[in-house]
Structures are given as C-alpha cells and as structure tokens.
Amino acid sequence: MDNFVEELRQETRWLSTEETEDESSANANVPGIYLPLLPKHFKYPTNMAVKTSEFQKVKEDCLCCIQDALLQSQWQRAAELMISYLEMLENTNSEKRVTSQEEIWRVGTEILQQHPQSNIEEVNYFADRMKNLGVKRYLKISLEHAFYLLCGGFLDEAYQNLILTESWRYGEETVAQEKELKLVQAYKGLIDYYRWLKKKTDLLELDEDSCTQTSVQQEMLSLYQQAKVSLREIIRIPGVWDPFVICYVDLLEHYEEYEEAREVLNDYAYNSKFPSNPNAHVYYYQFLKRRGESRKTQISALQILHELVPSHELMLEFYNLLKKSKKSKKHKLQLKVIFATLDFAGWKENVKAWTYLAKQIVEILQNSDKQFYWLKKEWDIRKDWWPAFHFSHYLAKRNWQENRKLTCEKVLIAGILLGKDCKYFKYVTKEGCKVQKKKFRQLKKFVKEHSWVSLRLADT
C-alpha cells in the first residue's frame, strides 16, 4: 500500500508543487489586521479549513491519475486505478462519499464503454450497482444505461430496462424527479416509434392481398397508440424536444391527424414558455409546405427563423417565397435576407446566393430611387468590411482558379458596389478578357455606365 501511495504522489507531484507555491504567494500578500488592543495571534488571518485526511489525499491523487489515463485513452490503466478509488464509497465524510458516487458513475461508465475487453454483462452489472447507491440518481443512471444499450444495438434490453425504470417509485423522490420519469417514458415511446417504423417498412414489402397485412397493420396501430401516449407527455413540458416532436408528428401525419400535428408544431414554435429554438420553426415550416399552406403562412414561419438564424440553409427558399410576393416591403426584406446570408463564411462560395444578389441589384438599378435607397441602406452596414471579406485580390485569384461561375457573379457585384477600381473587379476582368473577351467587355461597359452607383453608395 505504501508503494502505491508513493507512486501516486510522484505522478501528481507537479500539481501539489504548483498549489503550494500559489498558496505561499497568496499568504505573503495578505495584509495584517490592525485594531486597537488586538492580541498578537489575531493580527493575521489563519487557515480555518479542516485538515484533509491521509485517506482523502491518496484518493484525490488516485482520481488525478485516472483522469490522466482517460485523457490518454489508457483504458486498462484507468480500470486498475478505479479498483482502488472504489474505496471512496467507504468514506466517513458523507459529503465526500456522495461526490465520489457521482465520480465513480461517470468515470466508470466511460471506462466500460471504451475498454476493448468490456462486455454487456459487465456494463449491466455496474449500472445495477450504481443505481442502488442513491435514489436521487436512479433515473439518470437508468437512462444512461438505456442509451448505452441502444448504441450497442440491444433494443429489446433497452426497452425492458426503460419499462422497469418507468415503474420505479420512491416516495417524495418520485415527485422530485417527475421530469426524468417523463423522459424515461419518452425514450420508451421513441423505441415504440422505431418499431412502428420498421413495421411500416415491412408493410410496404407485402402484397396487397397478403393475409399478414391486416396483422401488421394491427401491430402498427398498437405501437402507434403506445408511442403517442409516451411522446405526448414529454412535449408538453417546456424544453427542447426535437427528436420526440419529429417522431410524434410523423405518427400523426401517417394517421391523417393533421390538426393535432399542426397544433403541436405551432405550440412548440410559438409558446413563450418554451426556450427559443430555431428547429421548431423549421419543423413548422416544413409541415406547412407539405400541407400546401398559403405562401403568406410559410413566409411568416420563415421570417422568425431568419431573425433567429440568418445563415440558415432555408434562407434561399425564404428569398424565393418573398420574390413571388407583389408587395414592396417583401422585396425590401428579400434584399435584406440575401445580404444577411452572405455575411457568413459558410455562404461565401454559394453560387446561387451570389446569383440572386446580382440579379436583384441589376433590377434595382433599372427601377425606382426608392429601391436604390434599400441597396444603400444594406451596403452602409457592410461597406467597411465586405471589401476585405469578399472582394480582396487574394479571393479574386482563388475564385478565378477554382470556380469561374462564382467569379462571374461576384465580379459584377464588386464592380457595381465598389467601382471599376476595385481589386477584385480589376483582376477578374483582366483575366477574363484573355479567355472571353466579348463577355467581359460587356461587363466592363455595364459597370462603366453605372459608375454613379458606387459614388452614391460611398456617400455618407
């Protein structure tokens, strides 16, 4: 035992050395307390902390070594060290004992999941032992156990584990962990949905006259009712429940319960009690699109998504919906949307986005002064950083070499917004004239005719 203790201390000596130095320097800077008639031994603050026992020091060193082994993926070494650390469960200090239970659960689960020689029997045994250590973590440990089984493909075992957990009751602790219990039920519902989905696939492969078709449909209906009850409970609680909502809506749509599906998605997206969640608006929009709802309703759903995530992949769909509108304010929003998407690096090389912007800018130049004001307003926000972000000499070279179609859209925008002296415009038109002289001469002519644009845009 003495050798083991010494080995642990040598392995973590650098930690204790640093801590000692920090404490020494901290004490050296502590000012004295000068009060009249104060006894000498009260003039400087003393450390009133309870002295750590030898047992506690050894186990803390052991935990440091385990953490080091985990970071280096040394699963066998971590497992051997955990055998020693399990003695912390016998700690006389109740606070330390409770903390160590959490540490053993977390670390032990990681080791068993990653160790190459681990097996399902060991994981099940460890999980069962940890569940019995404390009722406050029973449901959480059971859920994590179920996750492990699901990831390993043990679907039936996970389902049985969740059924057993669902029936767990322990006085006031049951009420205190009501949300966790609902989550257990929801994951059971998720497995029911998975089974329903498998039956649905099997049904498609059967002949219409097959005698087994009715039997499969009845099984599907039974699974649907089970899943519906479990999933409905969790999505009523304010939170982010994306996987459960998607499955629940899929079930409802299959059985043509469209009004309930719409109500669920609408509540998930717009209920103020729920946290802000961009995915909720995506699901609602996709449902509206599937149902062929009005363009106005679809625009309304995507407009909130635009405010939350202006770089979302659905912004091009949003742009096209706005384009079909006859209202001037929608066209103004249209310009704002396409500019906002190109503010993000993920869209820098999106040809379609640049094509949309180029076309709208040309339409604005051929339209009224009112629309030109929209362009000026959007450009004023970006004129200080877009030139370096999108229209540098380096990007001109790279775009020309890698994507000519992208370059041809960007060069027109660069010429209009920044003028013929823009580095991007000068490089691309020079190289372009070597391969497509007529096309790039027309481009230069167009930019020259609209040279007033860059001047007016530059005005403050």
Image (spheres, helix red, strand yellow):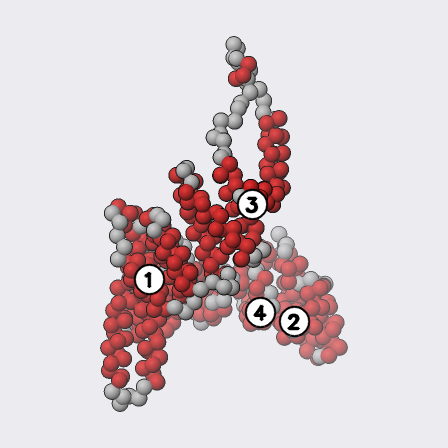
Q: Position of residue 205 (x, y in %)?
A: 35, 85
Residue depicted at x 27% and y 71%: 223
Q: Residues within 10 Å of mark 4 (few under 14, many from 20)?
A: few
| Location of residue 98 with respect to 438 vertically, above or below | above
In the image, which is nearer the foreground, mark 2 or mark 4?
Answer: 4
Label 3 to label 2, Cα distance in Å?
67 Å
Label 1 to label 2, Cα distance in Å?
58 Å
The secondary structure type at the circle numbered 3 is helix
The residue to which callout 4 is attached is 350
- Earlier in the chain: of badge 3 and badge 2, it is 3
Q: Position of residue 221 (x, y in %)?
A: 25, 74
Viewer-proximal residue, 421 or 238?
238
- Earlier in the chain: of badge 3 and badge 4, it is 3
Tell me whether the residue at label 1 lies in contact with that at label 2, contact meaning CB atoms closer than 8 angstroms: no
The secondary structure type at the circle numbered 1 is helix
Residue depicted at x 52% and y 46%: 63
Viewer-proximal residue, 206 or 140?
140
The reply, left or right, for residue 304 in relation to residue 409 is left
The residue to which callout 2 is attached is 407
Q: Residues within 10 Å of mark 3 (few under 14, many from 20)?
A: few
Tell me whether the residue at label 1 lies in contact with that at label 3, contact meaning CB atoms closer than 8 angstroms: no
The residue to which callout 1 is attached is 161
Label 2 to label 4, Cα distance in Å?
11 Å
Residue depicted at x 25% and y 69%: 225
- Earlier in the chain: of badge 1 and badge 3, it is 3
- Residue type at numbered disc 3: Phe
- Earlier in the chain: of badge 1 and badge 2, it is 1
The residue to which callout 3 is attached is 4
